[in-house]
Image (cartoon, rainbow, N blue to C red):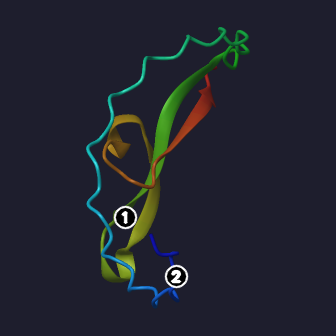
Amino acid sequence: MAAATSRPQGDIGQRGPKGDIGDIGQRGPQGDQGLKGDKGADGIPNAVKTKICTKKIGSGSSEKWMLKHGTDCVGDADAMDVYLPIS
């Protein structure tokens, strides 16, 4: 048997295309429930929570802005939740 002769290695070929993304794995189990938080402070005494907003009344030189509250502000994106004192 003749001795094996070593031959030089050839050039490296081009990189192949990226493979397809595999299937999505199964969802893991739900984690443990966290600890209950501390009790929050009581609300503001002698006050009621409501919404306030501004509404334009009139037009032209008689245009005025008025402060409105409660149901007048339903659907107003700029309305704010506030606490008003009860007398």
In the image, 40 versus 84, the foreground residue is: 40
Q: In the figure, is residue 20 to the left or right of 79? A: left
Specify few, some or many for label 2: CA neighbours under 10 Å numbering under 14, 14-19, or 20 or more: few
Q: Quadrant of the N terminus?
A: bottom left
Q: In the figure, is residue 71 to the left or right of 4? A: left
Specify few, some or many for label 1: CA neighbours under 10 Å numbering under 14, 14-19, or 20 or more: few
In the image, 21 versus 49, the foreground residue is: 21
Label 1: which secondary element:
strand
**On screen, 65 above or below 79?**
below
Nearer the camera: disc 1 or disc 2:
2
- Picture coordinates of residue 21, whole percent (x, y): 29, 56
- Picture coordinates of residue 23, whole percent (x, y): 26, 44
- Picture coordinates of residue 67, whole percent (x, y): 48, 52
**On screen, 54 above or below 59?**
above
Residue beneath disc 2: 5
User: Looking at the image, which residue is at 41% across and 24% down?
Assistant: 28
**On screen, 58 above or below 9?**
above
User: Looking at the image, which residue is at 60% across and 30% down?
Assistant: 84
Residue beneath disc 1: 56
- Picture coordinates of residue 25, whole percent (x, y): 33, 35
User: Looking at the image, which residue is at 54% across and 82% down?
Assistant: 6
Q: In the figure, is residue 50 to the left or right of 72? A: right
